[in-house]
Each structure stands twice: as structure tokens, then as C-alpha cells.
Image (spheres, grey):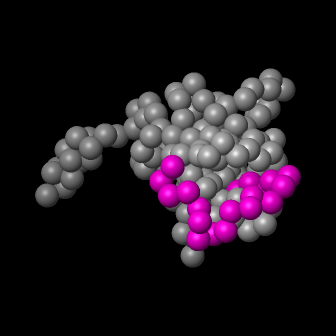
Amino acid sequence: MERREYTRVRAVVAAELTLPGGQTHGGVTGDLSFGGVYLDCDEPIGIPQDQLPQSEDGLLRLTLTDEAGTVSTIELRCQLVGTDGHRAGLRLTGMEPEYYQKFRDFLLSRTDNPEKLLREISCYPKKGFPREPGSPGFMDWLRWALKKT
């Protein structure tokens, strides 16, 4: 049974993680989604699982190449939620609108099911992320729910 909220996309992307204390780690992604990122770091993280920074955001920089070959760097706020040697599990907590669009387009261009991914981000917008154009808000949902009764 899939526990994840958002579709994962397998992609190897150059990344740099800056933790809340300023420690940085280079590496590459294993998979990405609107919920989080799996990161293979060049060096061990060096933070035991029981000492992870709680509710402090770090910064993840990804170097993306789009279908036209254009390279851009985006920044995503994240929390370190798991470590295992060189591996890091990151929960995404937000990003600026211009980065959101690039991240969104990157994931959509690499997923096997773009319609499913669009449905997920439209129906379940993530706190700290820009809203998807045309996505229903609470009042839209409430009007729909009241019509059904």
C-alpha cells in the first residue's frame, strides 16, 4: 500500500543541501515528489536519527535541466526527516512561485502519469507552496459538498 501523498518521480539531479546549522552536503537525488526528496549525499550526513533538527527548515538547491536543455537552479525549503549514512530523506516545506513552476514542469515532464500528478497537486495543495491555477479552494469544496446534501 502506497503511503505517499504525491507521485514520486525517479530522477538523478545534482543537489546541495544546507541544514539549519549551516552544514552543507552535495549529492544527487534518487527520487522527487511534491512531498519530499530522497538524496544520496557525497559525504555521510553525520546526524543520528534521534538528533535530527526538529521543525527547522533547511534549503535544498536542485540543478534542473528542462526538455530544451536549459539548466536552472531552484531552491526548496525542506526538513531533514531521515538519515542513513550517505542517504537523506527530506520533507519539502515550501518554495517561491518561480521555483514552483520550474519544479512542477520538471516533474510533469518525467512522470509516467502526468494527469495523476496534476490531479494530486490540484486537489491536495501543499502548505507553503503556491496554489495551482484553477485548483479548488475550501469554498469551492464547501459549495460542492452542500449541493450533494
Task: From the top left corner, tell me how far across and down residue 124 is, in percent.
Answer: 43, 50
Viewer-closest of 51 and 7? 51
Task: From the top left corner, tell me how far across and down residue 41 is, in percent.
Answer: 80, 54
Viewer-closest of 55 and 72? 55
Q: How many marks?
A: 0
Q: Residue at x 56, y 57 (%)?
A: 53
Task: From the top left corner, tell me how far across and down residue 88 is, in percent.
Answer: 70, 59
Residue 105 in sight from this viewpoint: no
Q: Is residue 45 magenta?
A: yes
- Location of the N terminus (image quadrant): bottom right
Q: Residue at x 51, y 49 (%)?
A: 56
Viewer-closest of 42 and 38? 42
Task: From the top left corner, tell me how far across and down residue 114 is, in percent.
Answer: 62, 45
Overall secondary structure of the magenta section: loop
Q: Residues in magenta?
A: 38-56
Q: Is residue 20 above or below residue 38?
A: above
User: For the view shown, which residue lies furthest in the front direction?
Assistant: 21
Q: Residue at x 80, y 60 (%)?
A: 44
- In the picture, measured across the screen, residue 118 lies left or right of residue 83, that is left
Viewer-closest of 72 and 148? 72
